[in-house]
Amino acid sequence: MDSHASPGLASAWAALSGDPALLARVTRHEDSAVLAARLPVRELAAACAGACGLAAAELVSVRDGGAVPGVRIDDRAVAAAFASERLLRVDGRVPESFAPLSRFWRTADGWVRTHANYPHHRERLLTALGLGEGAGPEEVAAVLRRRAARETEEAVYAAGGLAVALRAPGEWRAGPQAKVLEALPLLSAGRIDDAPVRVFAAPGDGLPLAGIRVLDLTRVLAGPVATRTLALLGADVLRIDPPGMPELADQQADTGLGKRGALLDLADCAGLRRFEELLADADVVVTGYRPGALERFGLTPDGLAARRPGLVLAQVSAWGRSGPWGQRRGFDSLVQAATGIAAVEANCEGRPGALPAQALDHGTGYLLAAAVLRALTEQTRTGGSRLVRLALARTAAWLLACPRGPLPSAVPPAPTEEHTAERHSAWGRLRYALPAFAYQGGPADWARASAPSGADGPEWG
């Protein structure tokens, strides 16, 4: 079934301060079978992808002249893109989405969700639980059955690990971090200074970001989804990882499409100096580290804009940048547990559930990319360095505020290979999900495959 702008798309586009008249340029092919859940995940996904596609089409019109190209959203393509990490195959191998210690656990008074995909997070979790390095799921389960969920949450956080207690939506809304987020819009955007109006050197030939240079300082998963989308649209995206902590291989294979990747130690004087040289020629910086992690290197919004007037700075966090949880690390699965999404999606036996995709990560990623596109468009009109911010927990609040349906009567169908492609890469034969949106004259695939962290030098292409 084909339709035009939905309330969700209109809401996302309004959050981006887009012209509502442009919503008529979006056509959507709906499929109610995909992304089925109690919460309207399919609507959120289509809205975020559609807003990003429309922001790209708008900037194409600004650069190339003429009308804004028509944008096409297909629910099945969106569902595949939102499950890209599950559709990924490397030489036919199915990647591991979650490590054995990344899951829900029963506690003495409820449930707790842990995240231990990275080796250092696994080590810190085990340390907090008083277990040795070789401990497995059975030992962790035995310890947690004797502990309270909130006590575990605080102990693991104090050790630098990742765990959150399951909450119902009302419990989360009554807490202090939710109160901070309630005061924020879905997307925060504003000017940092009065830098001159942006003038593009040449038309983009259908690629709105041709000639735009993006420094990618992000980790799993929303930030890399955003920068992967910017690369699709023609940007020269250079991802920077610390030498001692490169991205997980499967994660990089999925989200590194179209990008180049370098290793650079910002804690080293030479590394920071090289970053400053890269910054001098950058148009966009996207950050996704825990709030405060990069500021210690002087990479504050004002500091970055002072060194590179006309910059667009896009920041994404798990819990927001202020409040008692503002400095905490977080991932999609943890935000689902803390905000009440996992409780809403629980099965009939009360076991915590999950959305049919990591929709907070992917949805926030597409909104972040859309915000960058809109900031560049606005710079061509009024100039100014720009700052945009999103948080997974704020996206979660947007989803939770929507009407809920019944528990799906059947397990949602897994994404199919219909919207995937294959190509050779440094990893081997790579199968990956195709873009979530399309616009007339736009790219149907990325210009290059992903490559391991550090495959490129810290320099622009």
Image (cartoon, grey):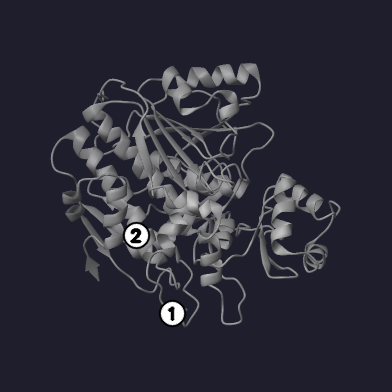
CB within 8 Å, label 2 to label 1:
no
Q: Which residue is outermost to the left? A: 66
**Residue displayed at 52% across by 72% down:** 345
Can you identify the residue that label 1 sits on?
406
* Residue 225 higher or lower than 24, as above or below: above
419 and 286: which one is in front?
A: 286
Q: Position of 377 compared to 43: left or right?
A: left
Is residue 281 at least partly visible in the picture?
Answer: no
Task: Tell me which label, 2 or 1, sits earlier in the chain.
Answer: 2
Q: Pinpoint residue 101: horizontal percent, then vertical percent.
A: 72, 59
Q: Position of residue 429 (x, y in %)?
A: 54, 50
CA separation, marks 2 and 1? 20 Å
Asked if residue 206 can be seen in this view, the reply is yes
Judged left or right of residue 19, residue 359 is right
* Picture residue at 51% right of the left edge, 66% below the top: 170
Q: Which mark is residue 343?
A: none
